[in-house]
Amino acid sequence: MCKDCGCSMDTGNAKEHHHHDHPALNETKTIEVVSKILSENDKEADHNRAHLDEHSILCINLMSSPGAGKTTLLESTIKTGKFKIGVVEGDLETNKDADRIIKAGAKAHQITTGQACHLDAFMVHKGLHHLPLNELNLVFIENVGNLVCPASYDVGAHLNVVLLSTPEGSDKVSKYPVMFRAADLVIVTKSSIKEHFDFDTKDVIEDVRKLNPRADIIELDSKTGEGMDKWIKYLEFKMELR
């Protein structure tokens, strides 16, 4: 008798006993559960978009790895004074990013996800109800810093914008294809220091074009202001289409 799982075994031929013959997970059931979760999330995402449409608000889902510059980009965008901005902030812990957004002059609501590596449509729905939507024309969802999980969850935004900072390296598009395939716009950030990190913008553009031909690409630096005009014009153009 095996002490671990209770099955009988020939002690004279113990090497023939394999615990992986007794899978712990039912793969079909797991797939069904995941599919149901995503289906319910997608329904809620559609509800979020409809709610935003009622208020004529353009909503953008900002995604990137930690430290790529999402909050800094938002601060610079807010300070232009061209838009009435609200932000749903997503982080594992702390209200630091929401505090920065409020200090910059916009409305913000922080969602702390604990161990969850992404925001979902249900979290965003709650966050939207903490923003004065009647006073806004542009809402950003600053997703949890992660180049994997956030791309799999529709949160109800109209556009997905993915940031890639030059210190991360120009190979990230090919390494994280799911994220960049979901992008409507890819922003290369911290462009003023790219020469210090062997960053090749041409490689990034080529990889994005192969993976996602429909995506636009902008290179900018939120600190120096380089390229910010292209970002602002992009936002203005997308808002005119609403």
Image (cartoon, helix red, strand yellow):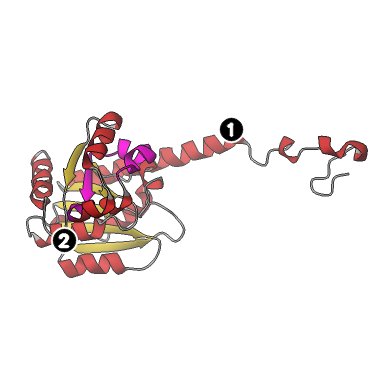
The image shows residue 115, relative to residue 43, as above or below, that is below
Q: Position of residue 70 (x, y in %)?
A: 25, 56
Looking at the figure, which quarter contains the N terminus? top right
- What amino acid type should be assigned to the residue bearing mark 2? Lys
The residue drawn where x is 75% and y is 40% is 19
Check residue 189 for magenta coloring.
Answer: yes
Q: Position of residue 119 (x, y in %)?
A: 37, 52
**On the image, numbered disc 2 is attached to which residue?**
223
Toward which corner of the image does residue 42 lie, by quadrant? Answer: top left
Q: Position of residue 72 (x, y in %)?
A: 21, 60
Looking at the figure, which quarter contains the C terminus? top left
The image shows residue 227, relative to residue 241, as above or below, that is below
The residue drawn where x is 12% and y is 44% is 234
The residue drawn where x is 7% and y is 60% is 81
Farthest right residue? 12
The residue drawn where x is 42% and y is 37% is 39
- What amino acid type should be assigned to the residue bearing mark 1? Thr
**On the image, numbered disc 1 is attached to which residue?**
28
State the extent of the magenta-drawn residues as a range: 170-192
The image shows residue 228, relative to residue 174, as above or below, that is below
> Are the residues flagged by discs 2 and 1 in contact, CB closer than 8 Å?
no
Toward which corner of the image does residue 21 lie, by quadrant? Answer: top right
State the SS at label 1.
helix
Q: Is disc 2 surrounded by few (<14), some (14 to 19) or many (20+) residues within 10 Å?
A: some
In front of the other: 182 or 28: 182
